[in-house]
Amino acid sequence: MRRVMAAVVLVAALSSGCAGSGLPRPAGETTTWSRDRFLRAHPPTGTPTAAPATFGKRVGALFSHDTKGDHFCTASAVDSPGRNLIITAAHCVHSGKDGAYLSDLVFVPGYRNGATPYGVWKVKAQFVDPRWAGDSDPDVDVGFAVVEPLNGKNIEDVLGSNLLGIDQGFGNLVRVTGYPTDSGAPVTCINKTTRELKYQMRFACNGYPPGTSGSPWLTHYDPRTKRGEVVGVIGGYQLGGVADAVSYSAYFDDDVRKLYERAIRGVS
């Protein structure tokens, strides 16, 4: 329950290796990750520790209503035909079994200590798998949300976006960037993922407390286009993990692809 302590408080307040190709990459994009440099900074032995993130405008914090309260989860911009989609954990936008969608949410990309350099984007609609809504199934703890235009532009026009990686295997070198609730700025860490359960991935790095649920697991990063593929989000098993040093994600397979397709069609 560690990752959603703040989210639970919010809900109470509101109610009280590549196994497949993934989604097609745009023509001409490469998938260079600068692996040697990252591994020198984050050796594979032991558990690294997250550092302050100095980049990553496509990642942001989720708030209720506006930025006056605490941010409670993390989300990020993901490519879509409507250029208006973000991805997070299902438990960040829906309270699960016997619950409902959270209301009046806003996404603040690049948030830092009260500053909103890329604007405050209102969430228009959220989408989770019926098995999350009906039974809090951790294997589908992934959510999408459509955000409204801001100043006549869609969010992808302002931020760009990362791609959605489907069936990319359980072992990927990923960067995970997220917003701890008790911090005004994001943290980031790089390590290789492993398989935890049949439909769950594991990421080991110190420094992912409450608030980091929904943090994207970005792989296949291309430094030229500044784009990668989101192959996971903190959530799933143990709602993302009970220790700050170990995080989990539901595996992104056809269930996530179908949910994504529902979100881009706007089908509840």
Image: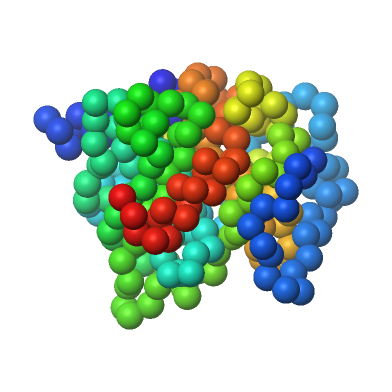
Say whether residue 115 is left or right of residue 80: left
Say whether residue 101 is left or right of residue 177: left
Say whether residue 155 is left or right of residue 58: left
Quick check: can you spot residue 226? yes
Looking at the image, which residue is at 68% across and 70% down?
Answer: 26
Q: Nearer the viewer, residue 82 or 255?
A: 255
* Picture coordinates of residue 199, whole percent (x, y): 60, 28
Looking at the image, which residue is at 40% across and 39% down?
Answer: 129
**Rendering quarter of residue 150:** bottom left
Quick check: can you spot residue 115? no
Say whether residue 144 is left or right of residue 100: right
Residue at the right extreme, as displayed? 36
Q: Is residue 265 above or below residue 232?
A: below
* Picture coordinates of residue 235, whole percent (x, y): 49, 32
Q: Is residue 171 above or below residue 46?
A: below
Residue at the left extreme, as displayed? 16
Looking at the image, which residue is at 54% across and 20% down?
Answer: 243
Looking at the image, which residue is at 35% across and 24% down?
Answer: 135
Residue at the bottom extreme, as displayed? 152
- Number of numbered callouts drawn: 0
**Rendering quarter of residue 252:** top right
* Picture coordinates of residue 93, whole percent (x, y): 33, 42
Q: The N terminus lies in which quarter of the figure? A: top left
**Rendering quarter of residue 149:** bottom left
The type of colouring in the image is rainbow
* Picture coordinates of residue 206, whole percent (x, y): 62, 29
